[in-house]
Amino acid sequence: MKVSIKLTILFVFYLQIGSTQPLSEKLFKNFELYKEQSFKNKRFKQKDILPLIDKKRNANFKVTEVGKSFEKRPIFELTYGTGPIRIMLWSQMHGDEATATMALFDIFNFLNASGDEFDQFRKELKAKTTIYFIPMLNPDGTELYQRRTIQEIDMNRDALRLACPESKILKELQQKYCPDFAFNLHDQSPRILVGNSNKQSTLSFLASAYDQKKSINGTRKRAMQVIALMNKEIQKFIPGQISKYSDEHEPRAFGDNIQKWESSLILIESGGYRDDIDKMFIRKLNFVAMLTAFESMYKASYKKVNIADYNSIPQNNYSCYDILIKNVTIDIEGQKYTVDLGVNKTEVLNDEKSTNVYIRANIMDVGDLSIFKGLQEWDAKGATLVDDFGNGKEIRVGQIANLKFSQNKRIVKVLENGMLK
Ligand SMILES: [Zn+2]
């Protein structure tokens, strides 16, 4: 008898632990169930997402064409829920920033699912919020995998002039819905560190400033609170790898203006993560972060967050190379001196039609680079840069960085196609 009481108590205790596990952890654990499998890499085009927007596939959404791009590609909105709290999200206003688009389709799969442990969450979300999703706002730019629209305009500097049809669509929707919260979803360079640390920024957040003084009104404060809450939850999965984007006011940007137009604007920038060139892991973090934020919005739990928690998120630090080689000796026919080498990698398409890439590394700077850091660093003290025959070799900024280093007439390190071995 005693044993069974003990077992019952243990079981009840276990159930409570199970039910109090935060949503973020449950989502992280179960992501693969909802992951949209058709994205093989980040270079997909609009034709790849059109079947995923199909109405039949999205029974829980209202699918609407909200306008057309400059090249007449349709732009779609998917609306979920009927509740009073309005949330609007758009992705890929920059055509080569695809991470959040993938995450939005993961979220659609998640919201279309049922019969799992998230039913209650979906029920409440649907009843308490109305969510407007606009995936891939710049389909013409995406077609060319370029940042700008086909008119060669950076859409995020077009919030006032509205020269792009895509910009007009975004402003019209924001003015029509007056969302309480708005998510501006981007990718930033993987070559950004968190504050003074050596850690790569995987996600960067910002409650954009609506004026030069960086004032904080109720609208911006709510964005800060939601960000601080997402930061706390996502830190569990990537400790020390979240930073804050620069809050300099940019009067032409959408984020800054939408904050001014009284939707609490949350910028999410997907950065870099070790060996995640197509950002499949960062996409998972986006999925968890956004759904966790939605929960805090309908439960109003973000209201308890102190904005000091937002302010304490470290800034983006741009003083970084992909590879930093320190203290290498250059030997030009007996004239010897010591330099550091800053090397960056670029993705190059194998051919125009392919979405496969190879990595090319280039020398970006030569000299005293002691104020910089590298995602990968090597102290080459005692090693000399040499050519294929082991003779001292000179170096030029801009050249392809396929390099050999020798010490005591033996090759000790090789940099080839961005790999330092
Ligand atoms: Zn962007």
Image (cartoon, helix red, strand yellow):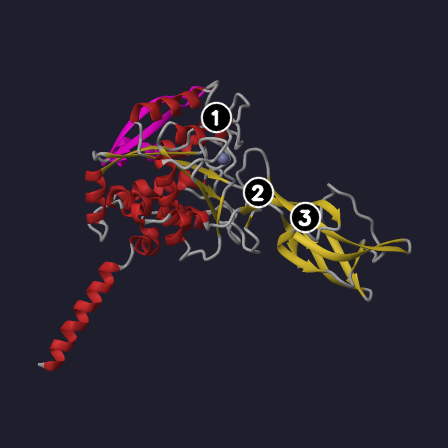
Residue 82 in the image, given as x and y percentages of width and height: 21, 33
**Mark 3 and mark 2: Cα distance apart in space:** 18 Å
Q: Which residue is mark 2?
A: 357
Q: Is residue 73 magenta?
A: yes
What span is colored magenta in the figure?
51-80
Of pointers 2 and 1, the one earlier in the residue sequence: 1
* Residue type at tag 1: Asp
In this orientation, does residue 37 appear?
no
**Quarter of image, res 338:** bottom right
Which residue is at a point 20% across and 68% down the rendered structure image? 13
Which is in the foreground here, disc 2 or disc 1? 1
**Callout 1 crowding tier (Cα within 10 Å): few <14, some 14–19, many ≥20:** many
Relative to 360, say whether 140 is above or below: above
Q: Which residue is mark 1?
A: 140
Residue 331 in the image, given as x and y percentages of width and height: 85, 55
- Secondary element type, mark 1: helix
Relative to 228, say whether 87 is above or below: above
Q: Is mark 1 within 8 Å of ligand 1?
A: no
Which is in the foreground here, disc 3 or disc 1? 3
250 or 271, nearer to the observer: 250
* Residue type at tag 2: Val
**Quarter of image, res 330:** bottom right
Of pointers 3 and 2, the one earlier in the residue sequence: 3
11 or 230, nearer to the observer: 230
Q: Which mark is residue 343?
A: 3
